Amino acid sequence: MKPLRLGAVSYLNTKPLVHGLDAHPDQFDVRFDVPSKCAELLHAGRVDLGLIPAIEYLRGSYAIVPDISIASDGEVATVAVFTRKPIGEVRTLALDLSSRTSVALTRVLCAKQWHIEPKFTPAEPDLEAMLRRADAALVIGDPAFAIDPQKRNVTKIDLGAEWKTLTGLPFVYAMYVGRPDAATPPQCRALQAARARGPPNPPAIARQESGGDRAYEQKVLAYLRDNLKYGLGESEQAGLWRFYELAAEIGVVPGLEPLRFYEQ
């Protein structure tokens, strides 16, 4: 049997899901990209299974690997809008397009939480450049995590926390998705086992990522330990479905698809 072509994400938040998979080349052929690229590869049939932005599930007839996601139940730390104006006064918003889920979540929160209708403009994730052309900026992933709001004189609005305030539910940013026949039960179980193991030494990962900056090391450790959730239980599924409903309500997606899962 050929190894499963697996598209994963090259961010810090995916380490607990992909750790050790490269040690099984007979089962998985893993490549790393930004989330939007993972989705493009899946839609094009160039990977069998992708750790893709949650909103991309609605762009095809796909199935989801059970019990695995990248989620938060409140503050997430790496998906945020940065602004030097009160959010209610924002009229233009620059978008980091690395994850279409974060873009869709921003649009939902603008409509349902902040009650604003800004003009959206795509941009590279360079905060100062973004704020020169817009009132506020969506930045995600490692670039967002590295921004110190005090040093940059900005207010950081955490989208995971805003979603929790709006709905009372967790938010699912990404999950493993593929064609309905792409993944076998043993392959799903292997991915679930990787999630269950996680990195063997989160403090060591934090030290490696920090480059000797002790404060940043503690920030990374807290992020991996406290902000991120990796399951896809009933509450996460409820949050995912509510996101789809609101995204469809404001016209971000054309319609809804039922949540379909691979057999375990």
Image (spheres, rainbow, N blue to C red):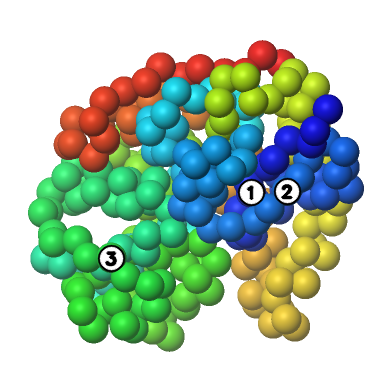
Which quadrant of the view contains residue 93? bottom left
The correct choice, above or below, for 44 with respect to 192 in the image is: below
Q: Earlier in the sequence, mark 2 or mark 3?
A: 2
Q: Which residue is mark 3?
A: 122
Q: CA distance from mark 3 to mark 1?
A: 23 Å
Label for residue 8?
A: 1
* Residue at 80% from the left image edge and 33% from the top image edge: 2
Q: Amino acid at mark 3?
A: Pro
The correct choice, above or below, for 154 with respect to 32 in the image is: below
Q: Which residue is mark 2?
A: 30
**Residue 233 in the image: x percent, y percent?**
57, 24
Badge 3: how crowded within 10 Å, few (<14), some, or many (20+)? some
Badge 1: how crowded within 10 Å, few (<14), some, or many (20+)? many
Q: Amino acid at mark 1?
A: Ala
Badge 2: how crowded within 10 Å, few (<14), some, or many (20+)? many
* Residue at 53% from the left image edge and 58% from the top image edge: 34
Q: CA distance from mark 2 to mark 3?
A: 29 Å
Instruction: Report whether residue 7 is seen.
Output: yes
**Residue 14 in the image: x percent, y percent?**
65, 51
Q: Earlier in the sequence, mark 1 or mark 2?
A: 1
